[in-house]
Amino acid sequence: MVTLKQLAKELNVSISTVSKALNNSDEIGEETIRRVKELADLYNYRPNKMALSLKQNKTKTIGVIIPNILNRFLAKVLFGIEREATKRGYNIITCISNESLEKEKESLQLLGSGSVDGFILSVAQESQVNNEIEHFKRTINQGLPIVMFDRVAHDVMCDKVIVDDFDATYNATKNLLRENRKNIAFFSNINDISVGKLRERGYNKAILEDGKQDPIVLKIKKKDDHQKKIKAFFKKNKIDAVVAADSSSGIIAINMAANLGMKIPKDISVIGFASKSDSNHTFPKLTTIRQHAKIIGANAADLLINRIENISSDQDMKTKIVKTSLIKNKSTL
Amino acid sequence: MVTLKQLAKELNVSISTVSKALNNSDEIGEETIRRVKELADLYNYRPNKMALSLKQNKTKTIGVIIPNILNRFLAKVLFGIEREATKRGYNIITCISNESLEKEKESLQLLGSGSVDGFILSVAQESQVNNEIEHFKRTINQGLPIVMFDRVAHDVMCDKVIVDDFDATYNATKNLLRENRKNIAFFSNINDISVGKLRERGYNKAILEDGKQDPIVLKIKKKDDHQKKIKAFFKKNKIDAVVAADSSSGIIAINMAANLGMKIPKDISVIGFASKSDSNHTFPKLTTIRQHAKIIGANAADLLINRIENISSDQDMKTKIVKTSLIKNKSTL
DNA sequence: GTGAAAGCGCTAACAA
DNA sequence: TTGTTAGCGCTTTCAC
């Protein structure tokens, strides 16, 4: 990598002249600027990012801590973050917490020592279960802003971007009630995290308000055989509708129902959280609750960068709610 | 963030004493070391990463350029890279090229100016189509090693990690021939990239070697309605087996076949590239070609870090082939 | 209009 | 055993 020093030497001027010339300072003569820029172009000079960061005490880099990159929703949020960050001149350093509190702490610690200007994260399952929030507070006290999305820690004062999980399942369930479904079940593979619980509550509320049936909830653990669990459930309970809290449950529910001879949506309706490409994985296509993951990511990046650059003068922390949409496909009436 | 300077001041010693003490230099007295470390702990001192990078001219950071994070395979490779990199003390900066040559160039350019010690990447579709490789060569000449995985540019001299795509579909097709299938079709949604072509060739070779049937290839474009295309194809051609080059095609093929009344695997066998969780999205479960994405990622990280740290003394570039495995599930006999 | 010098936080060769 | 100094690449204030 060519440096200012080398350019200066070759041009027989001082380092500061070169620096100023490249930054179009009006202290420098036109002719000099031209000469400097020419040589810089020739050598394809780029200012060293580390030197800039050190000097200006900002890195133009965002730390992103994601619990699980194999989750389509989270991957999509990451995509949204990356796009918005790039647009605003920021890079992202990605860490995958793998749902582990320890890794989450470590990432915060490691990147916190000068590598990034702030963090965007979704809380690891282990941290949520143990309600651990000290590490977040420490980071914030250190002067590094955090934006949390989806799985947030309510007791931490920071900007947040969340989904209207409760309303989403509440409305989805209402929808099924309007179809006159008599036995609506709720399937969930994510019952240990906050959003999973919110979704269950939305379902429960709709069922109880209606008052004509009892909630039936199938909780599937990560280690369970997903297909077998659902098959067994279908055989034991006669149900005519499913609200699925995660995308796999919805997809498997449809395929299994079809396999057991049920007609969709005549005999059974299914609504699930899923992305567009996932909803393609069933026939008929799954009626889905879309979370607009990319928008969530873009919003999170936006909030963080504004905070970093002090664009929003106000000190209050914001919580943005990105509303889900119900996309009606053919797995409901 | 607390600095050496501040610690030194508080302890009434010089900056270099503090630095040496923290690095356990034997130049420093035990008592001093203890005092320094105590205060450093108290203030939770961490050396500033930017300063270290600038000083030592290495960043302990890897640039990863991924064409599409929503692709499960690529996401999984990223996971593997991140895990291996973290294990060896490296961070990763992730850029998403979105299959665009321009973005790929830009990322190389931007991160190349001091932000990373090397790159791991899978070539963007646009770059492959136009056979653009100058930007890779430029980066390498700049002294930054590159490791390519999956979609590689053969004319660039660098370490590579690839999958035995040709053999994978060749063997899968042979497998179907052994089942005595008479009309084996090939479905692909990725025919414009190198691996897609390799997979088609493997299929073709097996069919032609057998000599008892003609290849039947269905190429699906990104903008096509995936389900409709496959449905129409099933209606027009009577086929009894499918080899799918991408995971969506395999999954949709099974669900659509079932929907059209075919019995799987009695009437039709399906084999596809997919991850474990994807193969759960069909009933019966999809017989899959596993690519071992995490291992690919780990290998790529390993190769790159060795190159960066000059562990492998040899100058020859290595190409590692990670063999696929055929996981027999119930969508084949 | 140009250059010298200080300083961002750190390490290390050299001096004391 | 500890401190002084130079330097990594850059910007910026202040002299000339």
Image (cartoon, coloured by chain):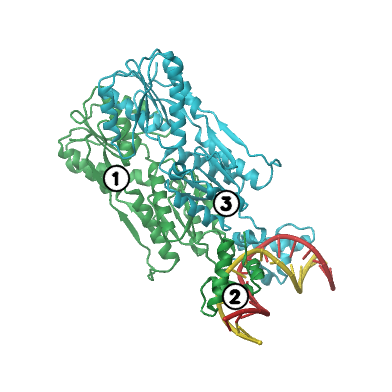
Chain colours: A cyan, B green, C yellow, D red
Measuring from the top left, give residue B70's x and y in whole percent: 44, 40
Residue type pointed to by label 1: Arg
Q: CA distance from mark 2 to mark 3?
A: 28 Å
Q: Chain of mark 3?
A: A
Q: Residues within 10 Å of mark 2 (few under 14, many from 20)?
A: some
Q: Nearer the viewer, mark 1 or mark 2?
A: 2
Q: Earlier in the sequence, mark 1 or mark 2?
A: 2
Give A217 or A53, whichever is nearer the viewer.
A217
Callout 1 secondary element? strand
Q: Which residue position is annotated with label 3?
A: A139
Residue depicted at x 69% and y 43% = A311
**Residue drawn at (30%, 34%) of the image:** A226
Q: Residues within 10 Å of mark 1 (few under 14, many from 20)?
A: some
Q: Marks 2 and 1: in contact by CB < 8 Å?
A: no
On what subunit does the disc labeled 2 rest? B
Q: Is residue A149 above or below residue A21?
A: above
